[in-house]
């Protein structure tokens, strides 16, 4: 077995900064959305994804993937949003296993009320803290990391599997 490639000081600094920034940003966005419109950050992301979909509707499995949530976790969130009248579900006539979530007019109205405060918080805490060059490097780097993770399909990386 090969020896682990431990992180050097700069790699640790980058990793720890990413982890802390992600957790703090998610926490602050969650607090702001709950305070302003009574939604969690995950619920906001669900509504936002649905708003951009054709007919404001997505298959539940596709929606779970889009918001990086488990199918059971998404089912719970959709249930909460459905009780609030913000989304509705429908079964697919051609595939009995498929269920679709659709953004209601009430959900769209709430999303439109929530978006300005959410975007202002994202800008204040994240976008405006970085230079244009830092934003470009971050978008490029995280885009590549996302591509690799999606390519692996939720399993361990190819390199890690090879070493086992």
Image (spheres, rainbow, N blue to C red):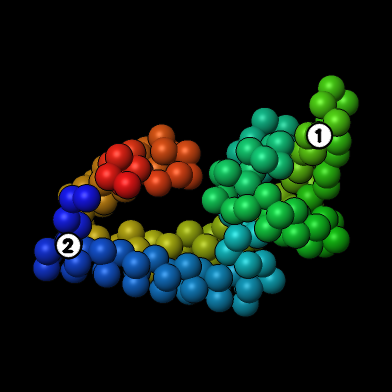
Give percent across and percent down for residue 145.
32, 45
Residue 132's place in the image compared with 19, above or below, is above
In the visual, does 66 lie left or right of 74?
A: left
Residue drawn at x 63%, y 38% as measured from the top left? 62
Residue pushed farthest left? 9
Please tell me which residue is depicted at 71% across the width and 42% down the height of the picture: 60
Label at residue 35: none
Earlier along the polypeptide chain: callout 1 or callout 2? 2
Instruction: Mark yes or no: residue 61 visible.
Output: yes
Instruction: Evaluate whether residue 81 shows in this view.
Output: no
Relative horizontal placement of residue 94, taking residue 111 as reference (left or right): right
Q: Residue at x 26, y 51 (%)?
A: 138
**Location of mark 1 (residue):** 97
In the orientation shown, which residue stands out farthest toward the front? 1
Residue 100 lies in what quarter of the image?
Answer: top right
Label 1 crowd (10 A; few <14 / some 14-19 / many >=20): few
Helix, strand or loop at disc 1? loop
Q: Between residue 118 and residue 26, name the one nearer to us.
A: 26
Residue under circle 2?
7
> Can you give x and y, in whole percent of width and height, for residue 127 in the image?
33, 59
**Image coords of residue 76 (percent x, y):** 75, 59
**Residue situated in front as seen by the camera: 87 or 69:** 69
Which of the 4 image quarters holds residue 163? Answer: top left
Q: Position of residue 95 (x, y in %)?
A: 82, 26
> Residue at 48% across / 74% down in the picture?
28
- Label 2: few (<14), some (14–19) or many (≥20) C-alpha neighbours in 10 Å: few
């Amino acid at each position: 077995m090969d020896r682990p490639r431990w992180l050097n000081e700069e790699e640790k600094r980058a990793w720890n900064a990413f982890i802390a920034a992600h957790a703090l940003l998610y926490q602050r966005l969650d607090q702001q959305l709950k305070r302003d419109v009574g939604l969690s950050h995950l619920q906001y992301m669900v509504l936002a994804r649905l708003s951009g979909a054709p007919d404001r509707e997505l298959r539940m499995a596709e929606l779970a993937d889009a918001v990086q949530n488990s199918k059971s976790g998404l089912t719970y969130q959709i249930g909460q949003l459905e009780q609030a009248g913000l989304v509705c579900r429908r079964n697919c006539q051609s595939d009995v296993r498929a269920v679709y979530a659709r953004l209601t007019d009430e959900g769209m109205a709430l999303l439109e009320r929530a978006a300005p405060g959410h975007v202002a918080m994202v800008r204040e805490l994240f976008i405006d803290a970085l230079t244009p060059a830092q934003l470009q490097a971050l978008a490029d780097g995280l885009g590549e990391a996302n591509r690799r993770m999606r390519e692996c399909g939720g399993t361990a990386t190819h390199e890690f599997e090879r070493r086992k």
